[in-house]
Image (cartoon, helix red, strand yellow):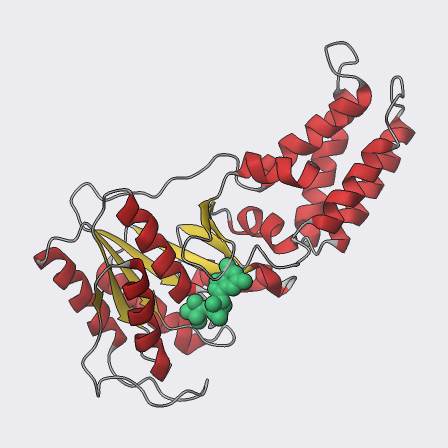
Amino acid sequence: MFNSLSDRLTATFKNLRGRGRLSEADIDATVREIRRALLDADVAVPVVRHFTAAVRERALGAEVSGALNPAQQVVKIVNDELVTILGGRTRPLQLAKTPPTVIMLAGLQGAGKTTLAGKLALALKEQGHTPILVAADLQRPNAVTQLSVVAERAGVPVFAPHPGNTSDHDTADAALVGDPVGVARDGVAEARSKQHDVVIVDTAGRLGVDQVLMQQAADIRSAITPDEVLFVIDAMIGQDAVTTAQSFAEGVDFTGVVLSKLDGDARGGSALSVAQVTGRPIMFASTGEKLTDFEVFHPDRMASRILD
Ligand code: GDP
């Protein structure tokens, strides 16, 4: 992830090393290089435009004096702007004043929701919480089993619909069978009655954004009034990330983003676009298939990683 972007930016900054005051032409040439590097990394065009305009304006206005030479100053400006587009500050999970904290997961099929449910549960358990998972994905026959497996690996209980209540269709067009809204609601009630302080509700995804998927996610959201709705997005989907994220922002109104598969060799554009385009913070990153491959997302650390 970010390897090529990182190399391109480093090469651009290298050209500035040892230089005195930078002329407007120098700055424009540098900004052009940064623009190309970002576009090649699949960063969304409006985000690139905004980013490069901010870098250019600050570089032109930068004072020569101070501890940093012009090259270092440009690196610092780019670093600051990367932190900004990545959401600025780390945004911790919002816990409910009165437990249970209800966390709903949303996203396309294959995004990594079920895996994330286990990762989040394990991390919360290690912090002393008592999470329970709720299997409200009745779309895929395997989804309930898969969540149960993940729950077992995390060592947390799972609330699942009774057998026979699940769909045995697995095509994108199959009508939704069973009542995912009811399961989600019952799961939250179960968490409350058994005094679990966090309840993580896994919902169905589909292969692409569609009305049925959005309506179901919106209905679940209204039924359980979650404290957090985490939109899980596969960082590997490249340019499609932005339109998918926008659709979910409008359809479900998520509170935070989880970037999954950051361990892959994606060019990183989605990671750099999603927070800015949706106005929602990136809260966690998923970095592998193991339940421990999971981290709180720190915009400043990610920016440093890119500029390393
Ligand atoms: P869901 O359909 O959204 O519930 O997605 P799943 O949790 O079932 O994940 C889909 C596939 O991606 C599975 O094979 C997971 O093991 C894999 N996966 C999930 N998260 C990650 C990740 O962060 N990195 C990698 N490499 N694979 C992941």
The answer to whether residue 291 is left or right of residue 275 is: left
Determine the image quadrant of residue 178. bottom left
Residue 130 drawn at (x, y percent): 20, 51
Determine the image quadrant of residue 230. bottom left
How many tags in the picture?
Answer: 0
Residue at horizontal 12 percent and vertical 56 percent from the top: 192
Can residue 247 be seen here? The reply is no
Q: Residue furthest left?
A: 193
Residue at horizontal 81 percent and vertical 33 percent from the top: 13
Residue at horizontal 72 percent and vertical 11 percent from the top: 67
Q: Quadrant of the C terminus?
A: top right
The answer to whether residue 136 is left or right of residue 240 is: left
Against 130, residue 184 (above or below) is below
Residue 235 drawn at (x, y percent): 58, 59
Residue 214 or residue 296, whichever sits in front: 296
Residue 270 drawn at (x, y percent): 61, 55
The answer to whether residue 301 is left or right of residue 164 is: right
Residue 172 drawn at (x, y percent): 46, 84
Against 203, residue 256 (above or below) is above
Can residue 289 be seen here? The reply is yes
